[in-house]
Image: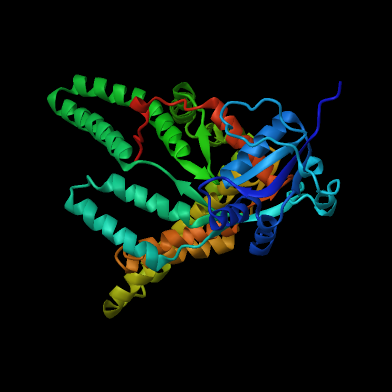
Amino acid sequence: MAESQYNIVFQGQLVEGVTHEQAHARLMKAFALDSVQAQALLARTNVVLKRGLSRDEAIVYVGKLRQLGLVTITDPPLEAVPPGLEPLEVRKTASADAGDGGGAHDAESAEVFRDKGPRELQFEFTGNGVEYFKIWIVNVLLTIVTFSLYSAWAKVRTMRYFYGNTQLDGSAFEYLADPIKIFKGRMIATAFFIVYVVSGKISPGFGMICGLLLLAVTPWAISRSLHFRARYSAWRGVRFQFRGTTGGAAVAYILWYFLTVVSLGLLSPIWFRNQMRYVVNNMSFGGTAFENEASVGKFYSVFVRLFGIFFVCGIFYVIYVVGSAGSVRIGEVGFFLLVQLCVMAALYTVPYAYFKVKTTNLRYDGLVLGQHVFESNYEFQSYFILLLTNTLGIVFTLGLFYPFAKVRNARYAAEHISIQATGDLGEFLAQQAEEVAALGSEVDDLFDIDVGF
C-alpha cells in the first residue's frame, strides 16, 4: 500500500504565548518572506502551506512551524504524535468542517512555502568600525586592569558582535558560549604552560618530559576548541557541530608537521591541506556535514607560486635598498625610513595576500552542505589593497586602527562568499533541527571548555 501523503494546513491560530508580532518576525526570518507576505499569511485561515509530504516530513514540518509560533494541522490527521512534538493539535482540515463549502479556501490557496530553485544567498556584514572600537577599547582596558582575567569575557563580547552582525538570508548568526567555560579552559592552558616553563628551570630532563606531555596534549586542545566553537555557534536556531577526534588532530597537526620537517618543507602543501580537511570535513550544520574535496595538486600549485613570489619580492627589495641608500641625504633620513617601512609592508603583503586569497578560495569555493554549494571569489588586487591599508593604518595609529581593520576584513569576507541554495531552505533547516534533537548533546559538561586562545 502506498504511503499516505500529508498536507500541512494553517487555520490562523498561534501557539499560546506567542504574539502576532513575534510570529510575523519569525516567519520573515525562517522562510525569507517580506513583511507583506508574512502579514498576508497570518491574516488568512485554512491555508495549505505544504502538500504531498510523507509522514516523517509532515512531523518535521509541523514541529518547525510550531517553533515559529504557528499551530498547524495535517490532512489526513496524524494518528500518532511522536515524542517531543506534543502537544500538537491534529484535527480534520477545513474541508471536513461544516459550512466550509468543500474546501473553498483551500481551492483559493497556493502553497506558500513551495520548493525554490537555485538562488544565490549572499553573506552580509552590518557592523562598523566605530561600534566595534568602543567594544574593543573597553575589552583591552579591562583585560589589562584584571591582568588578563577578563579576556574570556572580552572574547565572548567580540564573537557576539561579529556573529550578530553577520547575516545570511536575513538572519544573523549567534554565538552562545558562556565566558566562564572559556575562562576555565584558559586557566587549564595557563597552568600547563607554567608547569612547562618552571620544569625547565628545575631540570632540563624534567623540562623535556613536560614539553613532550604538552605536545601530546596539543591535539586534544585543538579538538576540544573546535568542538566548543561549533557547539556554541548557531544560525536560525540550529547549532553547528564538530566531530573530529583527538587522533585525527594528532595526525593532521603533529604527524604531518614532523613529516614536513623531515622532507625539508616539500610536504608543506599536504600538511596544510590535511589541517583544512580536518577542520572543514568534520564540521556540520545540524546533522549535515560540510564537504571539501580540494585536491593536493591545487595546494602544491599555490605553494610553488608562493615561493616564486617570495623570491621575486626579496630580489626587488634588495635592488631597491642598494639603489636608494647611496642617494639619501642626512636631512632626508627620516623620510627615507618612512618610505622603507611602506615598501617593506607592501612587499610583505604581496605574498601574504596571494596565499590568503588562494587558500580561502580553496576552502570555500565548492564547499558543499547537503545540496547547497558555497562560492568564494576572493580577488588578489582588492584583497592586497585591503591588507596593505589595514597594515599601514595599524602601524601609523600605534594599533588604534586595529578594530577598524578587523571590521573591514569581516565585511570583505561577507561580500566575497555566497551560497547557491537549492530547494526549500526552510525544510532543510527543519530537518537539521530534527536531527540535532535526535542526536542530543554529545559533550560532557566536564570537558565543555574552550582551551584555545
Locate residue 94: give its quadrant: top right
Locate residue 288: give its quadrant: top right
What residue do we see at 60% from left, 42% from top?
66
Q: How is the image coloured?
A: rainbow
Q: Residue furthest bottom?
A: 331
Total residue callouts: 0
**Would residue 45 be found to the left or right of residue 25 on screen?**
right
Nearer the observer, 234 or 125? 234
> In the rendering, at what x and y percent does residue 249 appear?
46, 27
**Would residue 95 be found to the left or right of residue 289 on screen?**
right
Locate residue 304: give its quadrant: top right
Nearer the observer, 179 or 306? 179
Question: Which quarter of the rendered picture does the N terminus lie within?
Answer: top right
What residue do we see at 46% from left, 62% from top?
127
Nearer the observer, 89 or 244? 89
Q: Residue furthest left?
A: 202
* Res. 317 in view: no
Please, is residue 122 above or below residue 195 in the view?
below
Please, is residue 356 above or below residue 96 in the view?
below
* Res. 240 in view: yes
**Would residue 204 be found to the left or right of residue 165 on screen?**
left
> In the rendering, at what x and y percent does residue 19 appear?
53, 54
> In the rendering, at what x and y percent does residue 443 appear?
43, 26
> In the rendering, at what x and y percent does residue 223 appear?
43, 30
Question: Which quarter of the rendered picture does the C terminus lie within?
Answer: top left
Please, is residue 361 above or below residue 213 in the view?
below
